[in-house]
Amino acid sequence: MCKAKFKNIRINAVYVGDEAAPFMPNNYNNHRVSVYNADTHKRTSFKFWASMRSPELRTRYDALNALYCFIGDAVSGLDSFNDFCGNFGYDPDSRTAYKTWQTCQRSAAKALRVLGVSRSELYDFLNELSAIAA
């Protein structure tokens, strides 16, 4: 188990290793990352795949990086679908692009709820986190 704290947010990452990454079928380095807001007592969780080189999250930095990736996806979900496609080079006629954007939208809803921030504050949160995790 890997743990970290950032502001009022507690992060726990547990190696599961039982599911292939949708973007890399031979990567089974998945984790269940739990996020808890100590102020609001709200929590959420998400799946996170570590790299092939470093398969298990072990350090505070690793846990913060997982949160950073989650918040980065969430911020992408705040874009319109056409902006999302333009920013990431997707074809707007792609069903895969649309499903990916919808996943990012779900991440945005989870992040906004658990962090208890506005849309603009979510960008600030990501920027603060990038100083130590990216």
Image (cartoon, rainbow, N blue to C red):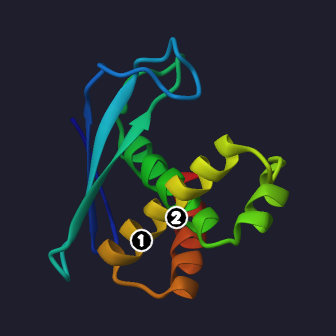
Residue at 35% over, 22% down: 19
- 116 in relation to 51, above or below: below
Q: Amino acid at mark 1?
A: Ala
Spot the residue most to the top: 26
Q: Locate residue 4 relative to residue 78 in the image: left or right.
A: left
Q: Locate residue 74 relative to residue 87 in the image: left or right.
A: left
Q: Which mark is residue 109?
A: 1
Q: Position of residue 24 (x, y in %)?
A: 57, 21
Circle 2 packing at 10 Å, graded few (<14), some (14-19), many (20+), is many
Q: Within the image, what quadrant is residue 81 found in?
A: bottom right
- 127 in relation to 100, above or below: below
Which quadrant does the N terminus fall into? top left
Q: Amino acid at mark 2?
A: Gln
Spot the residue most to the left: 41
Q: Position of residue 67 (x, y in %)?
A: 43, 54
Circle 1 packing at 10 Å, graded few (<14), some (14-19), many (20+), is some
Q: Locate residue 72 relative to residue 115 in the image: left or right.
A: right
Q: Position of residue 64 (x, y in %)?
A: 42, 52
- 47 in relation to 43, above or below: above
Exactly how many numbered labels are in the figure? 2
* Foreground of the two, 118 or 89: 89
Residue at 68% over, 71% down: 79
Q: Within the image, what quadrant is residue 8 found in?
A: bottom left
Query: Disc 2 designates what residue?
Result: 105
* Foreground of the two, 28 or 8: 28
Q: Within the image, what quadrant is residue 55 found in?
A: top left
- 61 in relation to 24, above or below: below
Q: Which mark is residue 14?
A: none
Residue at 41% over, 76% down: 112
- The answer to whether the residues at label 1 and label 2 have Cβ atoms under 8 Å apart is yes
- Which secondary structure lies at badge 2? helix
